[in-house]
Image: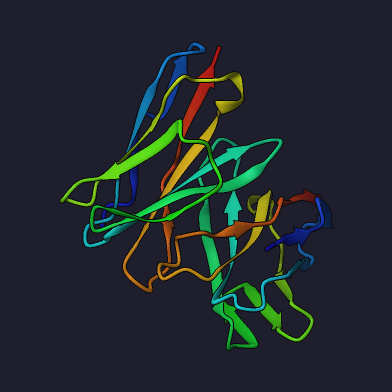
Amino acid sequence: GEDVEQSLFLSVREGDSSVINCTYTDSSSTYLYWYKQEPGAGLQLLTYIFSNMDMKQDQRLTVLLNKKDKHLSLRIADTQTGDSAIYFCAESTGYSSASKIIFGSGTRLSIRP
Amino acid sequence: KAGVTQTPRYLIKTRGQQVTLSCSPISGHRSVSWYQQTPGQGLQFLFEYFSETQRNKGNFPGRFSGRQFSNSRSEMNVSTLELGDSALYLCASSVEGGVGVFGPGTRLTVL
């Protein structure tokens, strides 16, 4: 069945770039997302990419998609303490992009001073 | 534009009881999806409603049900609560083909 995998933890120094990686199995994915969750909060959509794109840049965020390897990455430039959170990689194929989203287990990003 | 709202934000119930959670989507969004988040299972899709009809369903027992009203507001109901139903329940709304926006969630604790 569909599966999304990502590493559980990442620690980076403040000011450095963070790169969170993810692999997925469903080749018919339409949307691929990155969500951020802070303690006690809901899910904040950070960015998303359509499956026919290779890259998307949005301010400090860069998403790279390697469709052949089914690999998605999120790069956060100039990582700040406010970036500390859990980051979820996700994919969907539904009519509505909010439907039947398959999430990874989340990567906890911690920032070292 | 107001975001997705969920009520209540926190809820405590005991085993065997039932619970109803509410989700008000962003104005103009007709699709509402529900997700359950637990430490053990992560985020799992429950169901999606579109134009008052259930369009997709995840792999949850029949104790979990939902509905959508003509104004696109949605409710989900869990009957005969079990300890394992303790979770953060999230809803997301979208326009057709649009990106989903999640609400803050309802944290349900079953004692």
Colour pattern of the rendering:
rainbow
Q: Nearer the viewer, residue A46 or A69?
A: A69
Q: In the displayed structure, does residue B27 sit left or right of residue A2?
A: left
Figure check: A26 above or below B21: below
Figure check: B30 above or below A28: above
Quadrant containing the C terminus of chain B is top right
Figure check: A52 above or below B97: below
Report the residue at 54% width, 60% height from top: A101
Report the residue at 54% width, 40% height from top: B60
Q: Quadrant of residue A29?
A: bottom right
Can you give x and y, in whole percent of width and height, for residue A64 in the image? Answer: 69, 80
Q: Quadrant of residue B106?
A: top left
Q: Nearer the viewer, residue B107 or B85?
A: B85
Figure check: A22 above or below B87: below
Can you give x and y, in whole percent of width and height, for residue B45 in the image? Answer: 53, 50
Q: Nearer the viewer, residue B2 or A17?
A: B2
Residue B23 visible (yes or no): no
Q: Nearer the viewer, residue B32 or B55?
A: B55
Quadrant containing the N terminus of chain B is bottom left
